[in-house]
Image: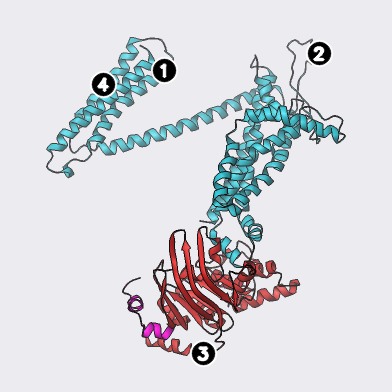
Amino acid sequence: MDATFLLLLACGLALFGYVLGRQRAAAFTARAPSWRAVHSRPGFHGSFVALAVAIPALLLLGIWAAVGRPGPSAVGAAIVLLAGLAGGALALRRLEPSFRARTWVERATMLVLLAASVLAIVTTVGIVLSLIVESIRFFERVPVTEFLFGTRWSPQTAIRADQVGSSGAFGAVPLFWGTIFIGAIIAMAVAVPLGLLSAIYLSQYASGIARRILKPVLEVLAGVPTVVYGYFAALTVAPAVRQLGLSLGIEDASAESALAAGLVMGIMIIPFVSSMADDAINAVPQAMRDGSLAMGATSSETVRLVIIPAALPGIVGGILLAVSRAIGETMIVVMAAGLAANLTLNPFKSVTTVTAQIVQLLTGDQEFDSAKTLSAFALGLVLFLITLVLNIWALRIVKRYREAYE
Amino acid sequence: MSIDTLARVAQNQRSVDARPLMTARDVHVWYGPKHALKGVSLDITRENVTAFIGPSGCGKSTFLRCFNRMNDTVAGARVEGRIELDGQDIHAPEMDVVQLRARVGMVFQKPNPFPKSIYENVAYGPRIHGLAASQGELDHIVEHSLQRAGLWDEVKDRLQDSGTALSGGQQQRLCIARAIAVDPEVVLMDEPCSALDPIATAKVEELIEELRGRYAIVIVTHNMQQAARVSQKTAFFHLGEMVEYGDTSQIFTNPREARTRDYITGRYG
């Protein structure tokens, strides 16, 4: 029997159990001398029976699927359905006016919610573990020190020993630099001023109408798929940046550049910075603003001298979160930053980032036991650790700041 | 009311400067469609502390906020009528709201020191209005204002500590020091003691008495004993109207209006 069909059947049985339980409870509720004599409303009795059917049946179904017997098996299906029926029958026998169905249903609800959150956490832990395991395999081949401090990145290892360039180089410093250069420096140079200033305008100066129109428009920017930003960066911004570089007399301005990717990434991050800054500014009590205005301060003096200093921790936290998003961003850098692992300060040159390299290393047919492919996991681990630290740091700042105003 | 308070009320009737510093004539305020203040006229002098009393939502704070045009900062608020400071219409186009607020200071219900040092809180106004030519002068203004606010002795050794680290009562006196640092002519106080304990309240009330004569003081209060203690003139508001205005002693001992009598005897409010 098909597993999907079995699932539907179990749900149908549970529904049937609900109706049956509810009917039985409604009957004895009607006969009871007073509504106080019945502990739970009929709906809870029904839900109790439904849960008694569904939980054993679905658990067994899950185990059955996990054990890996996807093929039709009448025995398995029968066991699943029997478990559901037995659960339902036992539950039905327990129904009586004094039975605390409501308590049981509430407890079961809590367990279902708990299971959902545990599942999300377990999955994340699993992903991190797999990253760590693969990274360890990589570090068995390439020393950690070379990876973290080496300045030459050339992961092409030869398939045959007699090929040219048979030894790959796994110094990831140019990648880290490229990531920081694009995500934390160029992108933030665009996003922080624009995002902050627009947040100040929206929260302090804009009339109600302007705010109602501009804020959603700004938030639309956050909804544009990153691949679209990628086209824009590669097809529109990158050539323009190259022209600019050439006209400035920079001979080696390349078609793909750190500046192009950074600018577009900055634009992409603006709504994020702006909404975090907006939250931080709005968390500053109105009394603070009134106090300053009542002293005869102008709006801009109030913003500069009172609101920004008071909101600064929240704003800094928001910027850190934005950095962690920017350095994890992939599409724009894949399309516009290039793949040459240059260690350069020149924004018109092509650089590469951790994410762009991971994409490069893992696309196409790969064997998963070479240093080349395994290096992707080590890169992913470093990226994960950096964003993790940034996020924890940022959230801590934001939290402490929230406490200050509550 | 006790004999004690009555004696104080009588004693408070001393003469300083009886000319009205601010006058309000037929002032109306709307918040959107809500008519929050209905045609109020009143004079404010340096001589007397004026108290606004009345139940919540009666328009007393709304009226107070007209005198330094703080209602301008409320979206949807509309003010009509004429308010003058020293004979100048404060709604006239040539009246600059920044200068108006430098002349008409305000102290709020909840102490709202800026998250800056005690020194910087008091120096805020003098800095933005450019009142001090040198650091020494600014130091002098800060010290002088803190002394007048009765806070100097408590904070002189920790002027660089954060203003928000002070106790509630100290914070409120810091806010008063901040308001008087620009040497305003009028000080508006919107329930300045409602967030304070009785001892801190007594200190602020003493301070109000000391500041009387130098500044025209208007205080909104929910506490009728407080109105009786600190003010010489009292205005009673109800449902957006000024029901009665007169000497504090008269309002509290012999109100003309039944609504006033009912309110001060605790019938409602």
Q: Is residue A159 above or below residue A63?
A: above
The numbered mark, 4 or 1, whose residue comes first in the sequence reads 1
Q: Same chain, marks 2 and 1? A: yes
Q: Amino acid at mark 4?
A: Leu
Q: Pinpoint residue B28: horizontal percent, then vertical percent.
A: 47, 68
Q: What amino acid does circle 2 point to? A: Val
Q: Chain of mark 4?
A: A
Q: What is the drawing colour of chain B?
A: red
Query: Which chain does tag 2 point to?
Result: A
Residues rendered magenta in the picture:
B247-268
In the rendered structure, which amino acid carries the disc numbered 1? Ala
For residue A155, side relative to residue B259 (left or right): right
Residue behind mark 1:
A65
Give the labeled residue for mark 2.
A164
Mark 4 lies on residue = A85
Q: Residue A270: x, y in percent?
A: 64, 41
Residue type at tag 3:
Arg
Who is closer to the viewer here, B4 or B162? Answer: B4
Q: CA distance from mark 2 to mark 1?
A: 49 Å
Circles 3 and 2: CB atoms closer than 8 Å: no
Q: SS class of the residue under badge 3?
A: loop
**Count of numbered tags:** 4
Looking at the image, residue B119 sits to the left or right of residue A35; the answer is right
As rendered, which of A85 and B223 lies closer to the eye?
B223
Q: CA distance from mark 3 to mark 2?
A: 104 Å
- Check if mark 4 and mark 2 are on a common chain: yes
Was residue B73 drawn as part of the magenta stretch in this picture? no
Q: Which chain is tinted cyan?
A: A
The C terminus of chain B sits in image quarter: bottom left
Do the residues indicated by labels 3 and 4 lie within the same chain of the protein? no
